[in-house]
Structure formats: C-alpha cells, structure tokens
Amino acid sequence: MASFKIRPAEPTDVEDILSMIQELANYLKCENQMQLTRESLLEDGFGEDKYFHCIVAEKDESDIESSVPELIGYALYFYTYSTWEGRMLYMEDLYVCPEYRGEGVGSCLWKTVAKEAVKRKCTRMQWVVANWSQSSIEYYKRNGAEDMTKEEGWHVFRMDQSALSEFASSSRRRNTATQ
C-alpha cells in the first residue's frame, strides 16, 4: 500500500495534472473531446485570474527513488453560486491513477475538497458521475451524497464554443420556445 500526502497543486505539477486529465478522458471514453493545453491549464489555475483550484495526491518521497514528486491523483474544483442557496463548490474532476485505486487516495482527495467547501461556508457541493460507473455512484451514495438524477423536471444543458459564439453574435432574437 502506497503512502501519500495531499497538497495544493503547484505550477510545476501542470504536466502531470494534464497527463492525468487525459487519462481520465480516456477512462470516460471522451478522449476525442480533450482540448485543454498546458498553457491554458497553467493560466487558468495558477495565473492572475484563477478559474479553478486543484489539489494533488503525491506519493510519499520514501516510496520513490527519484527526487521528482510522483503525482498519483488530483481533484479539480471551483466555486459557483446558487440564487436559492448561496455559495457552492463544484468538483469538476476527482481522479486516481489506476494502480492506486482502492487505497484511500480518492477518499482523501474528496474529503479534502469537502473540508474546503465547509471552510468556505458552501451550502452544497456538486459533481457528476458517468452513468455507467455504478461502483462510483454506489460509493458516493454510501458516503452521504444524493443522486440528483432522479429529480423530475430538471435538465442539464451545455453549449460548446461554436454554439456560444454563434448565439452571442446572433443579431436576431430567437423565439422558438413552445408551450
């Protein structure tokens, strides 16, 4: 069993984080959707105007032969706001390298993010899980998370960059809603 520590990500971790993000995209069968670059990750997480926060799980130095830290997982999150409830934390990713799963790394990352949400007086924390990842769904439920998928009447929408640009630059008002 590996020993590890959880710490805030640093700019020098960007290459490893980007690599794990790619591994996660592959795991989720979304590798073709991966467009993130090292530069944007560095700017958005460590630049002047931060868009996200990240923590990493680092293998204990006594377990590795090299002086270069070995990252074995990460959690990436950001703050958002609910007009009904106030402060919220959204966990975008929670990832642990396959060879370290089942050793408590993911639980420690998740708990660290949850503690940050409590510290920042967030009213809730949200994230999504692939519908085919039944073991993850059951794990989160066992630990007090509510599966909101069963909520009737709510749909999650998304616009990609192309749709955003088209909509934002459109000069005509679209009124296609039906009753």
Image (cartoon, helix red, strand yellow):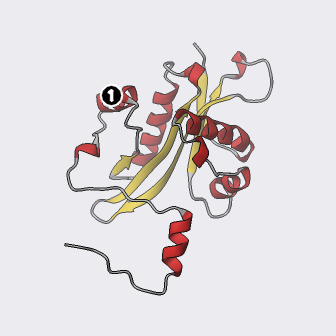
Residue at the spot 30% in from the left edge and 32% down from the top edge: 141
**Mark 1 sits on what residue?**
138
Q: Is residue 151 visible?
A: yes
* Above or below: residue 62 compared with residue 150: above
Residue 106 placed where, x, y %? 49, 29
Q: Residue at x 63, y 39 (%)?
A: 22
Task: Find residue 173 and report its horizontal and vertical position in percent.
Answer: 39, 85
- Picture quadrant of residue 13: top right
Q: Nearer the viewer, residue 141 or 54?
A: 141
Three-letter residue code for mark 1 = Glu
Q: Residue furthest top?
A: 1
Q: Quadrant of residue 145?
A: top left
Question: At numbered mark 1, what does the secondary structure look like: helix, strand or loop?
Answer: helix
User: Is 10 placed left or right of 95 in the picture?
Assistant: right
Residue at 65%, 51% (x, y): give it: 36
Q: Is residue 74 visible?
A: no
